Amino acid sequence: MIDAIEKRVIEKLSQHEQRLKHVYGVAETAVKLAKIYHESEEKAWISGMFHDIAKYDSLEDQMNKMDLRWIKAYVDFPVIYHAIAAANTLEHEFRIHDQDILNAIRYHVWGRKNMSLLEKIIFVADYCEPNRGFHDSEMIYDMAVNNIDQAVCYCMKASIDHLLSKGLEPSEEQLEAYQYYQEVTRGESQ
Ligand SMILES: [Fe+2]
Ligand SMILES: [Fe+2]
């Protein structure tokens, strides 16, 4: 199963070398965090490998893999469509019905309130995998090792700041998630 999933991702992203490196980076970083936090390494690998598989599909192709309710829910934020389409592809093509894996993929872009451990691992790994070349990757990874909620909060803020710097409005859902993790981490040592 794992081999088949990897093969599918390699085929799908064969024209996108940097993205392929990124998904390997996310999968490997997620496995490292899964080991530390006693989460399933297999689930971490699958979620990391598959999370961006629909990234280069047209919006039409992405929508073809989504239920109407999801299309409507994120109509103003189609950046989310690749995540929903990826989760649905994994479920339908590979018969993976594990909701934790599917949610980790669905919510990898913004995160959400009250995430499971696996969701947090994938959300943070997406930010701090080394191949992305972000200057603060190592610092975020170290933060995640010490306190994953703080790393989640940091990544959410970085994502919101990035949008604001481009003159874009973060969604209500994204702001609520950030507020939630600010509260979760309030009072904890930095
Ligand atoms: Fe993504
Ligand atoms: Fe990603």
Image (cartoon, rainbow, N blue to C red):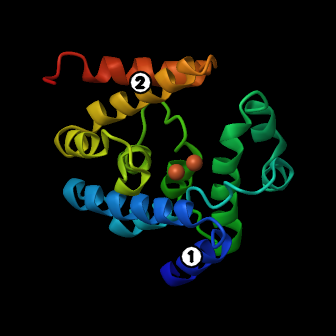
- Residue placed farthest to the left in the image? 189
> Are the residues flagged by discs 1 and 2 in contact, CB closer than 8 Å?
no
Residue that appears at 76% across and 27% down: 76
Q: Residues within 10 Å of mark 1 (few under 14, many from 20)?
A: some
Sequence order check, earlier mark of 1 and 2:
1
Residue 119 relative to residue 37: left or right: right
SS category of the residue bearing label 1: helix
Residue 54 relative to residue 36: left or right: right
Which quarter of the figure has residue 144?
Answer: top left
Name the spot of residue 10 as percent of width and height, x first. Answer: 58, 75
Of the two numbered discs 1 and 2 in the rendering, the one whose residue sits closer to the viewer: 2
Measured in 3D between alpha carbons, the distance from the residue under mark 1 to the one under mark 2, in whole angstroms, is 32 Å
Which quarter of the figure has residue 179?
Answer: top left
Residue that appears at 50% across and 19% down: 176
Quarter containing the C terminus: top left
Residue 36 relative to residue 69: left or right: left
Name the spot of residue 12 as percent of width and height, x first. Answer: 67, 71
**Is ligand 2 closer than 8 angstroms to the Cβ of mark 2?**
no
Amino acid of disc 1:
Ile
Q: Is residue 170 above or below residue 94?
A: above
Name the spot of residue 106 as percent of width and height, x first. Answer: 59, 47
Name the spot of residue 83 as percent of width and height, x first. Answer: 63, 49
Amino acid of disc 2:
Lys
SS category of the residue bearing label 2: helix
Specify the label residue 157 is tagged with.
2
Residue that appears at 22% across and 39% down: 143
The number of numbered badges drawn on the structure is 2
Q: Is residue 59 above or below residue 34?
A: above
Q: Residues within 10 Å of mark 2 (few under 14, many from 20)?
A: some
Look at mark 1 in the image and give the residue it sits on.
5
Q: Is residue 80 above or below residue 65?
A: above
